[in-house]
Each structure stands twice: as C-alpha cells, then as structure tokens.
Amino acid sequence: MNQSRRDILRMTSIIGIGLAGSLFGSFNVFGAEWMPKSFEAKSLEDALKEIGVDKYSISTDVSVVSAEIAENGAVVPVSISSVIPKTDYMAILVDKNPSPLSAAFNIPEGTEASITTRVKMGGTSKVYAVVKADGKWFVASKEIKVTLGGCGG
Amino acid sequence: MKLFITLIFTIFLIYSNTFAVAGNSSTDEIAKYRELLADGNPAELWEMRGEELWKKKIDPKSVSLEQCDLGKGPGIVKGAYVELPRYFNDVNKVMDLEQRLIYCRKNIQGLSHEQAVKIPYGSVGNPSDIEALVSYITAESKGMKMAVSTKHPLEKEAYEVGKRFFFYRAGSHDFSCATCHSADEKRIRLQELPNLLNKADAQKTYTTWPAYRLSQGEVRTMQHRLSDCLRQQRFPEPIYASETITALIMFLAKNAEGGIFDAPALKR
Amino acid sequence: MPSPMRIRAVLNGETVEVKVLIRHDMETGLRKDTTGKFVPSHFIQKLTIKYEDRMVLDSVMGISVSKDPFLSFKFKGGEKGGKLSVTWVDNIGDTRTDAAIVS
C-alpha cells in the first residue's frame, strides 16, 4: 500500500473519531494533503520539487517580514505576503533546516494572502516565501540571523 | 578640480548615508524581534489553565482555591500580586505568591506538602500547576502599580535580608547579584543587564515577570528566574519557595514600587 | 485531552482579523531527553479554519513550526456574531476543535 493510501486511511479514521462531518465536508475541494515527502525533503530544492514547483521567479510582490536577528531560533516570527492577484497557495521554507518546509497554506477566495506565524530555525538561514498565483510560482526570501544570546532577560 | 572633489565627496556622503540608514544595529533588530512576538503570547494559554485550576474542586477535600486569601481577602485575586510579598497574620510571616499558594493548597485544599510543591517548574509532558496558577493570578494585576509595603517589621526585615543577599558574594566565581546587576549599560553578549539598583530598570524588570520564555517553551516565574540566576552564579540550588528567595523578591519588588505591572510577558 | 486554544476574531471594517494561539509541544523528534533518548515527534500536521460553513484557511505543518503555535491572518465576508472554528490534527491522531464568535 503506498504512502498516500495510508494517509487517506489514517485521515479517514481520524475523521471517524467523533468529528462533525460538515467540518471536513469541503475537504476534497480544498483539502490540503499532509504529504510526507514534502516535509521529509531535506533540501530546499527537494522540498520545492515535492510541493510541485517546476519553475519560479523572484518577485518583489511577495514578501517575507521578520526581524533580522532572532534571539531564539526556536521561535522566529515570520509574516509572508503576496499582492499578486489569484494567490491561492503560500508556503514558508527555512533553507538550512533539517525539514525546510515549515508550513503551507491554501488561501481560498476572500482570505488575504498574508499569514503570520512562528517558525523554528536551526541556525542562521534564509527564510523563503513560496507563492502560487494563477498557476505560476513566485518566491521571495530574507536572511534571518539566529543567536543564542547571553543569560536571558 | 574643486568641482571634481565636491562631486566625489557628495557621492561618498550619499554612499555612507545609505549604509547608515540600511544598517540597523543589533539592538534595533532584537527590539524588532521582541515587538513582532508581542502579538500573541502563549502565556495566555497558561492564564486560561490557571483560572481553571483556581476554580477547580480537587481531592481530598473537593475544595477549590477560591477561598484562598492572597492578602486582599479570601478569593480576591485582582490586584493581589502587586502587593506581594506581604506579611500574613494567619501565619505570622512574610510570604511571596508561591509560598502563599503552597499554603492555600495545603490548608484549604488538603494537599500534602509534597503534592503542593510538585512540579514547580514545568517541562514537556509535565505541566506545572503552580506556573499556571501564577500566570492567572499575575494577569489579574496587569496594568496596576507595584505597591509592596515594608511597614510591618517582618516586611522590613525581609527587605533588608533580600538587600544583603543581593550584595552577598559567594560560590566558586565569587559572584553576587550585584556583580551583574548594579551598574548601568552592562551586557552579557547580546543580552542587556538591568541595573536593579536603578529605579527605572528595577521597575521594568520586575513588572515583566512571570514570562513565557521562548528558550524554555514554558511560563517561568520570578522564583524560577532567581533560581536560574543563582545557578549561573554557581551558587547551590535554592530550595523551592525558600525564605531567602522570598526576601530577595521582597527587595526587588519594593525597588520596583510604582512601576506598572505588565506580566505575564514574553521573553527570550 | 488536548488543551483549549485561544482564538480571537475581530471585525475591522470589512475584514475579520483572526489570531490563534495553540497549546502544543510540536516535538520535532530530533530532540534528546536527559537520558539521551530521542523524544518522539509530536506535532500538528493539519489546521483548518472555518467561518460558519466556509473554509477560510487550510494549512499543513511540519516540525519546523514553533512550540505553542501562533497564527494570524485576515479574511473578508465575516460579520459580528459569526462563528469561527479552528481544528487541528496532529501526527499521533490527537485533535482539537475550538470556536470563537467574531466581535
């Protein structure tokens, strides 16, 4: 049995554990699949490939907002945004992490293509925003330095 | 020739100014990092759990903490923290919040001492009820002015003992609290060290504990912060909720008088 | 039983701003405990947010998301009094759903 079949079965059994059916009613329309391969990819290029990025362009209409220094790599606030029309997918990747793909978001119509969250960074690295809009891929990045600092304030 | 030199100079100025504008100092970027994290403090999750625990009836007596007197009367949580540590008539001694919580958990809820002091510092898989309760209780003092009293002789004594401890050099490195915290503008690597003898610094520091510590992934109380300081000073580990720590907290809390309490906060 | 989330949904003009704080260890599986053994991975894999019956955000996450995850985003078409619900599912099958009213 291949991995995606196992995933579907696992998802089905989770749904079976007392979740209201309607919640996952729209699952198949928009449902983001947790694909092990994209999260297990060890390099940025492999992760991009697993997400389905064939080719991309660097865009100034996509932004990664964060501080340049993170006091603690365990919690790094990052905002990714896209002003490109018809943006329907955004992902955050941390280049030097053991699992570069941090999180991915399906953006339905009506939702602003701007997400703020917190990622783990193993060390100083570039953080990428990868965006899909109207079938095309766009990328922006920012380097964030990670420091352990002193004795803790 | 003069025109040429002026031109070169102008270009140089523009170039160097561009760099000056673009190159933020480390402190600025760290400030930005902290600012970006201010929105959405995981400590709120601890506050929620603490409120539940305060109201929860537990064995053996099936009683909650809602009759616990934190100094302002039984069950009054609002504003209690900014007046702690304080003298308590019923025990004839000065207690800080955690000592008082232990007392209430034993005397009102019937827990044994061992149960009452269990897991003072949480970790993954072992959440601390005390840290949650402290989060809730301190949140109920947010926005209020620090107003610890030293009127009672035992309160005054606790302050003096705390002060003495602050300057007490010991341990393998001969450190005291004062070694790191008694002068302005000091830092360890990228961490600024507050001067706890300076009123503004003392206020800013004391009013931002407890805090969700990113490096620990837990809410840590002043008790933990001090215990950790002592570890870094290479002092022996203090007994949890000891008189010495209460005295030290008394010294710091009194020095922070008038400061607006702003915790639970978020820290590295 | 997983702990409750903290959800805030506020209407600002035409946009609802949502902020979610989740109590979750988000263990990577790469961390060692004090005995030297690897702490097993335990992290949220899927997060779905709905406004009434409409899906407003659908996310997959891995081990690179911070402990006690925080998420903030905005959507249009929400109204005061409307129900926002957030559901997460993690890699060991734990799940939690919480709701909040748009204010």
Image (spheres, rainbow, N blue to C red):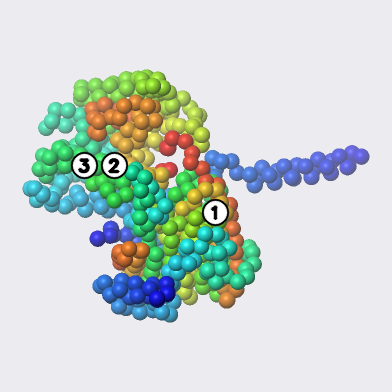
Residue B196: give x, y in percent of width and height.
40, 28
Q: Disc 2 on helix, strand or loop?
A: loop
How crowded pointer 1 is (Cα within 10 Å; few <14, some 14-19, many 20+) is rated as: some
Q: Which is nearer the eye, A101 or B268?
A: A101
| Residue B65 makes an appearance in the image | yes
Image-based side of B119 in relation to C70, left or right: left
Q: Which is nearer the eye, C66 or B74?
A: C66
- Chain for numbered disc 3: B
Residue at which label 1 appears: A96
Residue at which label 3 appears: B118
The type of residue carrying mark 1 is Lys
Identity of the residue drawn at 23% across and 51% down: B51
- Residue at far right of view: B1
Residue B104: give x, y in percent of width and height.
15, 40
Residue at which label 2 appears: B121
| Residues tagged by mark 2 and mark 3 found on one chain of the structure | yes
Q: Which is nearer the eye, B126 or B36?
A: B126
The C terminus of chain B - image quarter: top left
Q: Where is B175 relative to C88, above or below?
A: above
Q: Are marks 2 and 3 in contact (CB under 8 Å)?
A: no
- Of badges 1 and 3, nearer the viewer stands 1
Identity of the residue drawn at 27% across and 32% down: B148
